[in-house]
Image (cartoon, rainbow, N blue to C red):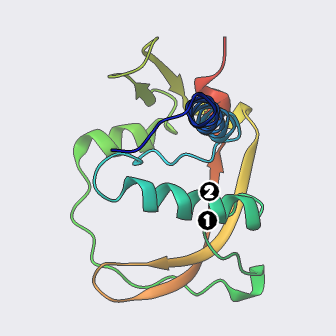
Amino acid sequence: MTQLSRRKLIVSGLAATAGVTGLGVAAYLADKYGLVPPDHGGLYGPGETLTYATQRLLTRHSLAREFSRSQISKPLPNEMPPLRDEFKRFEAAGFTDWRLSVEGLVDQPTSFSVAQIKSYPSRTHITEIACEEGWSRGGSIARALCGLLLDRP
């Protein structure tokens, strides 16, 4: 049996305390700067978190390669199912009656009109859109900044 001296016990305790404190600070900073992905749990969580944080730190928060406007592809002819009556009604009214509902695991369920969503800052992202059926094309996506919608008073 090994002798555990007071010095070894104190050094081990300080090292353990420093390690736990370091992990706590790292977790706080990762959460503060948005370096933890929404799907960070489960078997692949640590690897997913490391990849997500690395991409955000090295690429200015861009998770997908961006392209120039000249690289946008022409639209593909897709088969579309017939539009439902509800969609046709919203379309005829210019989507003035349509609302985006935010509910479920949120503190304050709410909804937004198209006009409210358009009043928030948006970002256009030109990237490759890949379909699970095998085709891909360059496309432009304009989106509202969801964090601003959800953080509003």
Mark 1: secondary structure:
loop
Q: Which of the 4 image quarters holds residue 21?
A: top right
Circle 1 Cα neighbour tier, 10 Å, few/some/many (<14 / 14–19 / ≥20): few
Mark 2 highlights which residue?
53
On the image, the x and y values in percent for residue 121 come to 76, 39
On the image, the x and y values in percent for residue 18 come to 66, 34
Q: Residue at the spot x=68%, y=30% of the render?
A: 148
Q: Residue at the spot x=65%, y=38% of the render?
A: 22
Along the horizontal axis of the image, is 75 left or right of 53? left
Separation of disc 1 and disc 2 at Cα? 10 Å
Mark 2: secondary structure:
helix
Along the horizontal axis of the image, is 81 left or right of 78? left
**Callout in the foreground (1, 2):** 2
Front position in the image: 22 or 65: 22
Of labels 1 and 2, earlier in sequence is 2
Mark 1 highlights which residue?
63
